[in-house]
């Protein structure tokens, strides 16, 4: 009986060590350390909807072992160089390029939905095109997807639901046409999903999975390898 118990404990330890090894490997991947040549590298670029949620981790789980996912989200960041926190001025932007991704998912614009930094859409479009061109110039020649961010479900706040709908979303469409980049339309996909955004902006765990599912469907619908 004691031998059986010892055997069960030993098996349990082996399973635990193996699980920890898998988890450690996953954390390295999401922590932008895994540059394995035989994996498809996905860079998730964005603000706190990327950096502060489970969506990149969920996306990695959906994509599977042939992929590695780097989370390069920066809370509060925006496209516009006139904003208080331009993404292009953040260290994460350089780290995302050094990652040499094969796929780039850019989900920015929510923090640009601010009447204080909008005069017209020209600077937003020009700055977004500049950001994309930096990724287009990488030797890894990544496939770049532009994401229309989820709606803002709080009215009269910053970011503004009205500015996002009336200014940012049409400008993202313009950027996509100008750069010949495909769009992932989370805005339309989640427009009736306010229950998954408790504060009106950031998804809960279920909302993060919805985001990951939409992005997964888009990037696996083509041969992205």
Image (cartoon, rainbow, N blue to C red):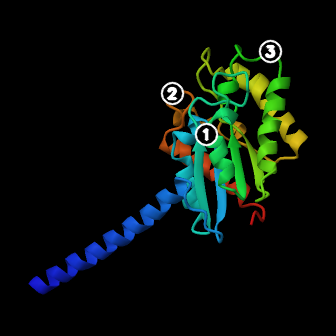
Question: Vertically, is 182 above or below 35?
Answer: above
Disc 3 target residue? 119
Mark 3 touching mark 1, by CB under 8 A? no
- Image coordinates of residue 155 in percent, x first then y, are 61, 18
Other residues around mark 2 within 10 Å, as few (<14) / some (14–19) / many (≥20)? few
Which mark, by number, is residue 71?
Answer: none
Badge 1 element = helix
Instruction: Return the residue at label 2.
Output: 199
Sequence-wise first label, 1 or 2: 1
- Cβ atoms at labels 3 and 2 below 8 Å apart: no
Q: Earlier in the sequence, mark 3 or mark 2?
A: 3
- Residue displayed at 84% across by 37% down: 175
Q: CA distance from mark 3 to mark 2?
A: 27 Å
Which quadrant would the N terminus be assigned to in this image?
bottom left
For the point 65% across and 54% down, the residue is 99
Residue 20 position within the rendered picture, expressed as x and y whole percent measured from the top left:
37, 65
Of callouts 3 and 1, the N-terminal one? 1
Given this view, does label 3 or label 1 mark the residue nearer the observer?
Answer: 1
Q: Is residue 124 left or right of residue 84?
A: right
Q: Which one is nearer the viewer's eye here, 41 or 188?
A: 41
Using the rendered image of the protein, determine whether residue 1 is visible from the camera's viewpoint: no
Q: Position of residue 136 (x, y in %)?
A: 81, 50
* Vertical arrangement, residue 58 with respect to residue 159, above or below: below
In this rendering, position of residue 73 left or right of residue 171: left
Front-most of residues 32 and 167: 32
Determine crowd level at label 3: few under 14, some 14-19, many 20+ residues with C-alpha closer than 10 A: few
Label 1, label 2: how far apart the Cα atoms are: 27 Å
Marker count (numbered): 3
Q: Which residue is mark 1?
A: 91
Q: Would you identify the image quadrant in which residue 208 lies?
A: top right
């Amino acid at each position: 009986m004691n031998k059986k118990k010892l055997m069960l404990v030993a098996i349990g330890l082996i399973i635990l060590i193996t699980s920890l090894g898998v988890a450690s490997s996953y954390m390295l991947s999401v922590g932008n350390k895994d540059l394995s040549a035989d994996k498809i590298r996905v860079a998730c670029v964005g603000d706190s909807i990327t950096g502060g949620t489970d969506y990149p981790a969920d996306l990695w789980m959906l994509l599977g072992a042939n992929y590695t996912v780097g989370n390069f989200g920066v809370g509060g960041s925006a496209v516009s160089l006139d904003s208080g926190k331009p993404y292009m001025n953040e260290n994460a932007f350089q780290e995302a390029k050094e990652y040499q991704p094969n796929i780039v998912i850019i989900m920015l614009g929510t923090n640009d939905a601010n009447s204080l930094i909008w005069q017209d859409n020209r600077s937003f479009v020009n700055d977004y095109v500049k950001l994309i061109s930096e990724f287009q110039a990488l030797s890894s020649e990544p496939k770049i997807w532009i994401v229309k961010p989820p709606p803002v479900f709080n009215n009269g706040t910053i970011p503004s639901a009205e500015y996002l709908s009336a200014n940012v979303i049409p400008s993202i469409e313009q950027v996509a046409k100008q750069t010949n980049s495909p769009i992932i339309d989370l805005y339309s996909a989640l427009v009736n999903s306010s229950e998954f955004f408790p504060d009106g902006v950031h998804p809960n765990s279920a909302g993060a999975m919805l985001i990951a599912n939409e992005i997964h469907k888009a990037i696996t619908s083509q041969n992205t390898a």
